[in-house]
Amino acid sequence: MVDCVMTESKPDAGSQAGQQTAGTAAPAAEGPADLAGLRAAAAPDGGASDTRPDEGYDIRIARDGTWFYHGSPIGRLPLVKLFATVLRRDEAGDYWLITPAERGRIRVDDAPFVAVEMRREGEGPNQALSFRTNLDQWVTAGAEHPIRVAIDPETGEPGPYIHVRGDIGRGLEARLNRPVFYELADLALAGATEAGGGDGPAGVWSQGVFFRLEAA
């Protein structure tokens, strides 16, 4: 375990003080004190032997994007944002918090982020669709940030995601919450109507890339 203590500057007055967690009376946790040096996190130099210990942190990211530590929600949004800067996903699909001194697996129920707002600029194939995550990061859909829709094999319900960072296919994604996905679906239907027909696949354009919103 790391001996140093992480310090954090206080947020400006009026900033959001924590995550909104509905239906829970559990006290807010401050987070693990041994995750020090998060702002300076980086992998070891290329070619160097990685001697950092592998640990398992009792941290879970729920499907709604809430971070939990030892079963209690982490109530300070600036701290959650700090942890998110060192969140990584490996080739096996496991999620890690990686600091210069150590690394540890965490649990993620679905995707680590949730898209809670959508903004549209322009029209047609060159329009830009941007999404704000629950941690206030904006991502614009395009070649570097594709949208994908996974169909639940049991329920048949669509699960929409947008790539946030890391390698496409095994990086970090944001799940579009239901209102945002409905808004996106409305754009797809409007696009089909304006095109004069609905025979093609339902989907949306963003930065010159077409994204299907239905199964192939």
Image (spheres, helix red, strand yellow):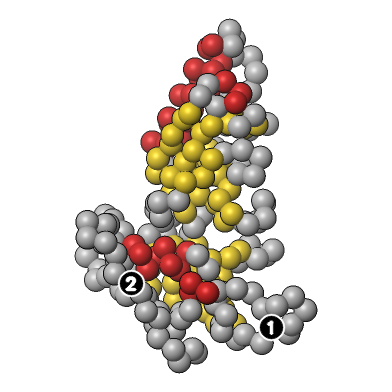
Task: From the viewer's perspective, tell me whether residue 106 is left or right of residue 136.
Answer: right
Residue furthest top as drawn: 196
Q: Report how many numbered discs are placed on residues in the image.
A: 2
The residue that appears at 29% across and 64% down in the rendered structure is 11
Q: Residue at x 32, y 75 (%)?
A: 30
SS of the residue under disc 1: loop
Residue at (64% x, 44% y) in the render = 144
Name the residue type under label 1.
Asp
Q: Position of residue 93 (x, y in %)?
A: 63, 62
Residue type at the position of mark 2: Ser
Identify the residue position indicated by label 1 in the image: 50
| Residue holding disc 2 | 9
Q: Image height check: is 216 above or below 159?
A: above
Tag shown at residue 185: none
Residue 130 percent across, percent down from the top left: 49, 38
Front residue (pair 14, 145): 14
Residue 186 against residue 170 in the figure, above or below: above
Q: Rounded to the nearest whole Å, what is the CA distance between mark 2 and mark 1?
A: 30 Å
Report which quarter residue 183 is drawn in: top left
Residue count near mark 1 (Cα–Cα under 10 Å), binned few <14, some 14–19, many ≥20: few
Considering every residue shown, the one lying at the far bottom of the view is 3
Q: Name the image quarter holding the C terminus.
A: top right
